[in-house]
Image: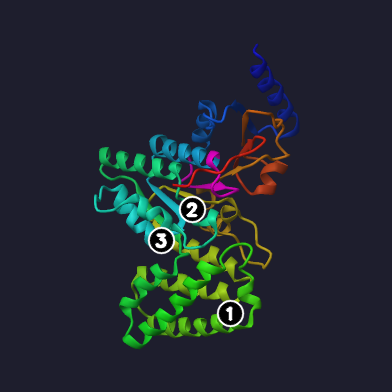
Amino acid sequence: MTQSAYLCFIVALTISSILPCKAQYIYTERDFKSDTLSTAQVDLIIKNTKQHSIIGLGEADHLKGTFYRIKSQLVRELILQNHFDLLLLEADMNTCLQLNKYIKGDTTIHLNQLLPEMNATNNYILHNVYNTPEIDALLNWIKAYNTSYNNKITLAGIDFQHPQHLGNVIKNYLPQALQSELADVVNVYSKYYHDYMDYKNIFRIYTADSLKKEAATAAGKVQHISNYLGKNEDKYLQANLASLVCMSGFFTDPNGIVYRDTTMFNNLCLQIGTHKAMIWAAAQHLQESNTISGQYWMGAYIRRKWNQQYCNIGIYGPLDCMPAPVKDNTIALELLVNNATSNCLQNNNESIIISVKAKTIPYATVL
């Protein structure tokens, strides 16, 4: 027995002693040039997701290259083996409309122009969250797959963090006076995204008197627009309008950001229909617990609506509740599947957990 195989054997024995009997654990050790799941790990995930029609693919940290490669691997295998046909992204829904045209063969759409438009914030990580070689490769793989399989795969966005794109949709339904108010709102919110929407500066919006006043004035104009369009039955318009109202809320209330999960859930519901859907998002949004302000993450609403059809997969950095050591010059990938209860799964609200253990998990390259 090789040293690596022996380690796997010992780890398997260790975890079997600390987790309920229904838990399934697979450990694999990789170098950083092949940091994706092993065949055995993929097979176990595919086996445990066959009965589900909605799969959450959560990442604990945005822009981590290993996380993206694992998630891309799972998207491809869920399409090939379990016949999933809808990929939903925690990304600007209007940009994703164009991405969907791209993966279905529209030659006028240029991918390199769309990927930086997925999120309008000035924060380097969040702005580039989809602007990576891994995302580029995945979308081009889906495009090639669609060429062979009659455009079977659809892509859509459920997020809305791009004020200009919301405004471009809504203005077509407004009279001139309200178009002017909408333009004022878009200018204010675009400024916020450009100057303040990062973890360091966002709270200035809630503490600087001039910004608080500006946000309140913009929110009043959003209310005018909402009152005017409230009875319009166009679902696409209403999704954009609800997203603008939500955006207005989190620029006037420090706790308002949690309402984003309700809005993303509503946007998700518009897209799913009869599809088998994969949801690519931050792990937190896919969990089922409530937030500090008493609202719930999107995963709670998904579970409430679809119950056992929903399976949540979370990809994390090192988790102490998993036994593999962190070693030099290698990357360890731990897969835990559990239909019962373990402290690890219970604490993270996932059905399947992938723990990535390495001294450093590098960020993806930005295109």
Mark 1 and mark 2 in contact? Answer it, CB < 8 Å: no
Q: Quadrant of the N terminus?
A: top right
Q: Could you say whether the residue bearing mark 3 is in a helix, strand or loop? A: helix
Bounds of the magenta span? 51-66
Q: Which mark is residue 203?
A: none
Mark 2 and mark 3 in contact? Answer it, CB < 8 Å: no
Residue at label 2?
A: 128
Q: Earlier in the sequence, mark 1 or mark 2?
A: 2
Callout 1 amino acid: Leu
Callout 2 amino acid: Asn
Image coordinates of residue 140 in percent, x first then y, are 35, 42
Q: Could you say whether the residue bearing mark 1 is in a helix, strand or loop? A: helix
Which residue occupies 54% across, 38% down? 66
**Does residue 111 appear left or right of residue 217 in this picture?**
left
Which residue occupies 48% across, 47% down? 366
Q: Which mark is residue 93?
A: 3
Callout 3 amino acid: Met
Work out whether 323 lies above or below 367: above
Q: Earlier in the sequence, mark 3 or mark 1?
A: 3
Mark 3 crowdedness (10 Å alpha carbons): few <14, some 14-19, many ≥20: many
Identify which residue, 149 or 34, lies in the foreground: 34
**Does residue 328 appear left or right of residue 77 in this picture?**
right
Which residue occupies 50% across, 66% down? 263
Residue at label 1?
A: 211
**Does residue 253 appear left or right of residue 20 in this picture?**
left
Disc 3 and disc 1: Cα gap in Å?
Answer: 27 Å
Image coordinates of residue 292 in percent, x first then y, are 69, 64
Mark 3 and mark 1 in contact? Answer it, CB < 8 Å: no
